């Protein structure tokens, strides 16, 4: 019950902090100022922090037995807050701070958890994954410090508060028995939510950055699945390479004077969206409804130390597979990559050279 | 800031409680193959919708990247959870997918740049003549 004790204590502290800030603002300035502060804080995503706090207090005080309201609707509230979390937090101004806080705190929690599960950073987790957690935590902490220095510590603190409290709510929701499930749902919300934001945003640079978030979500899916080499390759190749390429593409081809046309014409849009939604529904139906033949749970590598089998580093096995079983595809792909890059260089250069030389040899690239 | 520290401590305390009571988590994890498949299908659908509804070449390419990623996630998830599969096989295939996606992105962006140099636009509807 130490979980509920600590969560309820922190929730009470959070509410106390909010109350004193409001009272102080009301005493020093006009009541309108206090109201404005309150609405500002709520808009920054603080409501997400308040809902789990209230729920925890409610459960802790045993009110569900006295009032008769089961905690399940409260849990539903927690779920809704948790699902809304990435979207709402990120959409607000201070919300990137909350987002970074979530990442950083999750990383710190992961490190602590590994520390407690093993004998002092022992053998239960592969070294690369532990290193990744440390790197993520460092990145989050340093961006927070920089951001605090730039935008001021008040808003940064607010964002940090919202992020930490949301993590507390999420942790309490999963009753802390399933770290992997918590990681999965956070990652899924980030990947799918950023995908939705790619779809709906109207500026192409914004789309590129949402693509970054979605691809980072996929990288963390790979880490969750025990594919550490693949996860870091995803970060290196996609986020470090392809996304930068996309940004170059955007900056080189975007004309400032012509606004981006948001969507295709309605004649194409309506059947297209219908087909897309139907395909998605069919895929989800097939994926979720089928009875796939799965391995026994003891044979599946997990990141959780509670599980039977713990994931091992995959780099050695991958290198061996590339050099033995998959040697032919490996060579073919390397030739393909070479040809594609030479071709890309030629296509991208050919036209501008042709322009400067008088447009004589532009046909070579098109053929 | 007191509240934030309190919440931070609560998260740590919760983890402490979990580490001290491993029996509660000894049951199999709540996340299985179907979870990954559903997420992957959702992202695939989003990529498809982006390809359908956008006119900019670069936005369409972003949709294609989402499609490739969701397919790669399926490979890894199936290889990890399916009976009789070696997890490394799925990862090898996904690495190939990443390599091919990199080649595709470089080539397609070069073509987009070329189209922009020719017709001064990257809208798909504007690129309708073979010899720009």
Image (cartoon, coloured by chain):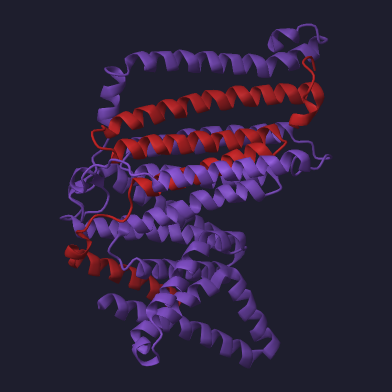
Chain colours: A purple, B red
Give the image location of residue A120, x and y in percent. 18, 55
Q: Is residue B122 visible?
A: no
Residue B42, placed above or below residue A360: below
Residue at image coords 23%, 57%:
A115
Give the image location of residue B70, x and y in percent. 47, 38
B95 lies left or right of B84: right
Which of the 4 image quarters holds residue A60?
bottom left
A79 lies left or right of A152: left
A138 lies left or right of A260: left
Residue at image coords 34%, 37%:
B78
Residue B71, placed above or below residue A199: above
Residue A216, placed above or below residue A56: above
Q: Is residue B12 visible?
A: yes
Q: Which of A352 and A230 is in front in this view?
A: A230
Which of the 4 image quarters holds residue A257?
top right
Q: Nearer the viewer, residue A210 or A40?
A: A210
Please state, as top left, top right, bottom left or bottom right, where the C terminus of chain A lies in the image. Answer: top right
Give the image location of residue A76, x and y in percent. 44, 71
Residue at image coords 27%, 42%:
A294
Q: Nearer the viewer, residue B36 or A222?
A: B36
Residue at image coords 38%, 17%:
A330
């Amino acid at each position: 019950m130490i979980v509920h004790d600590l969560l309820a204590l922190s929730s009470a502290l959070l509410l106390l902090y909010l109350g004193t800030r409001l009272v102080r603002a009301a005493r020093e300035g006009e009541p309108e100022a206090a109201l404005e502060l309150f609405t500002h804080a709520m808009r920054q995503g603080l409501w997400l922090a308040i809902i789990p706090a209230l729920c925890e207090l409610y459960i802790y005080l045993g009110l569900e037995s006295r009032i008769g309201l089961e905690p399940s609707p409260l849990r539903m509230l927690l779920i809704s807050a948790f699902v809304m979390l990435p979207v709402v937090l990120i959409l607000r101004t201070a919300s990137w701070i909350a987002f970074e806080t979530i990442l950083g705190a999750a990383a710190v929690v992961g490190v602590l958890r590994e520390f407690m599960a093993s004998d002092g950073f022992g053998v239960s987790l592969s070294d690369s994954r532990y290193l990744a957690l440390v790197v993520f935590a460092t990145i989050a902490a340093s961006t927070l410090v920089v951001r605090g220095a730039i935008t001021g510590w008040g808003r940064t603190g607010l964002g940090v508060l919202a992020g930490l409290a949301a993590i507390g709510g999420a942790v309490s929701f999963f009753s802390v028995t399933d770290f992997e499930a918590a990681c999965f749902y956070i990652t899924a919300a980030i990947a799918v939510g950023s995908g939705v934001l790619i779809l709906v945003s109207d500026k192409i640079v914004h789309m590129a950055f949402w693509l970054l978030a979605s691809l980072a979500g996929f990288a963390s899916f790979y880490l969750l699945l025990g594919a550490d080499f693949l996860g870091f390759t995803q970060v290196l190749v996609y986020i470090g390479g392809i996304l930068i390429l996309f940004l170059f593409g955007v900056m080189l081809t975007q004309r400032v004077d012509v606004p981006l046309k948001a969507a295709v014409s309605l004649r194409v849009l309506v059947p297209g969206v219908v087909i897309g939604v139907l395909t998605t529904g069919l895929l989800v139906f097939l994926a979720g409804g089928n009875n796939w033949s799965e391995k026994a749970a003891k044979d599946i590598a997990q990141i959780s130390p509670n599980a039977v089998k713990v994931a091992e580093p995959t780099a050695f096995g991958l290198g061996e597979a590339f050099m033995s079983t998959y040697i032919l595809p490996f060579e073919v792909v390397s030739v393909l990559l070479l040809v594609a890059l030479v071709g890309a260089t030629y296509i991208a250069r050919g036209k501008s050279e042709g322009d400067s030389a008088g447009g004589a040899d532009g046909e070579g690239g098109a053929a | 800031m007191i509240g934030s520290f309190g919440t931070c401590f609560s998260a740590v305390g919760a983890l402490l409680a979990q580490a001290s009571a491993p029996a509660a988590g000894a049951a199999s994890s709540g996340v299985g193959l179907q979870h990954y498949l559903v997420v992957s299908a959702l992202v695939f659908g989003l990529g498809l919708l982006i390809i359908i509804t956008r006119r900019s070449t670069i936005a369409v390419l972003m949709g294609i990247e989402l499609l490739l990623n969701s397919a790669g996630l399926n490979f890894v998830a199936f290889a990890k959870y399916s009976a009789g599969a070696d997890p490394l096989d799925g990862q090898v295939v996904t690495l190939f997918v990443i390599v091919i996606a990199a080649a595709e992105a470089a080539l397609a962006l070069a073509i987009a740049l070329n189209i922009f140099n020719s017709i001064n636009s990257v809208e798909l509807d504007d690129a309708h003549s073979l010899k720009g």
